[in-house]
């Protein structure tokens, strides 16, 4: 557990030390960016998710971009043998766009639409991540939560299983809370 916390802190330092960003994200969004990136390494998607062996692996970001250019440095990196692509979806909520993501971050500005967005993803292997207090109760997989002077996360194991995604034990162990039916 300590090793993963140290590697996460090192990753945040690397992201934070990159010069030339047009918009500097807050500490909160630097941490969330690091977690989003790390989630790719602790989740397994069904093989049918990827149509080609050389396909991309996609992080979608819905809503306002509080991350600035933080993902520029890692975009194109190889994750599970696939090239990382970051799609800034803005306020687009067309289900076909969302279903093309392996991880979908839903900004708190979509709080009222969360249930309908998640319903449109039903049966699709999308690891949904939100930042509202009721996100996992609404059917999302992971929700960021405030933890003292830091950020933690909750995981709905049930929502992950419904999406066909397996969350690895290492990630479950460091979650602030794991919800299982």
Image (spheres, rainbow, N blue to C red):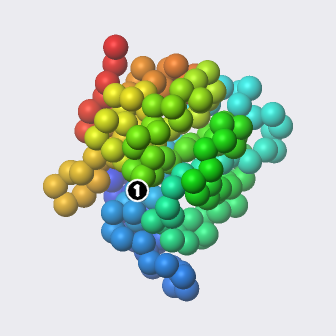
Q: Residue furthest bottom?
A: 20
Give the residue displayed 60% in from the left and 70% down from the top. Answer: 73
Give the residue displayed 45% in from the left and 37% down from the top. Answer: 114
Which residue has dot 1 on it?
32
Tell how many labels: 1
Q: Residue furthest left?
A: 148
Q: Is residue 68 left or right of residue 171?
A: right
Q: Position of residue 14 (x, y in %)?
A: 46, 71
Q: Quadrant of the N terminus?
A: top left
> For residue 75, which quarter of the picture?
bottom right
Q: Is residue 60 left or right of residue 78?
A: left
Q: Position of residue 68 (x, y in %)?
A: 51, 71
| Secondary structure state at the residue bearing disc 1 | helix
Q: Quadrant of the C terminus?
A: top left
Residue neighbourhood size for the residue with mark 1, other residues' Cα within 10 Å, grouped as few (<14), some (14–19), many (≥20)? many
Give the residue displayed 54% in from the left and 26% down from the top. Answer: 119
Q: Position of residue 53 (x, y in %)?
A: 81, 38
Q: Is residue 152 visible?
A: yes
Q: Nearer the viewer, residue 174 or 21?
A: 21
Give the residue displayed 75% in from the left and 34% down from the top. Answer: 50
Q: Is residue 69 left or right of residue 32?
A: right
Q: Position of residue 94 (x, y in %)?
A: 66, 41
Q: Is residue 105 left or right of residue 93?
A: left
Does 3 appear above or below 136? below
Q: Residue furthest front?
A: 112
């Amino acid at each position: 557990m300590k090793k993963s916390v140290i590697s996460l802190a090192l990753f945040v330092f690397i992201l934070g030390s990159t010069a030339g960003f047009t918009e500097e994200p807050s500490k909160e969004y630097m941490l969330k960016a690091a977690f989003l990136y790390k989630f790719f390494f602790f989740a397994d998607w069904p093989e049918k998710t990827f149509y080609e062996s050389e396909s991309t692996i996609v992080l979608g970001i819905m809503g306002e971009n509080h991350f600035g250019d933080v993902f520029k440095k890692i975009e194109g990196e190889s994750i599970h043998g696939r090239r990382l692509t970051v799609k800034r979806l803005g306020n687009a909520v067309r289900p076909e766009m969302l279903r093309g993501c392996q991880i979908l971050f839903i900004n708190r500005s979509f709080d009222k639409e969360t249930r309908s967005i998640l319903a449109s993803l039903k049966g699709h292997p999308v690891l949904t991540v939100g930042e509202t207090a009721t996100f996992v109760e609404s059917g999302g997989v992971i929700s960021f939560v405030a933890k003292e002077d830091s950020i933690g996360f909750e995981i709905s194991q049930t929502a992950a299983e419904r999406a066909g995604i397996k969350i690895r034990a290492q990630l479950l162990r460091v979650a602030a809370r794991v919800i299982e039916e």
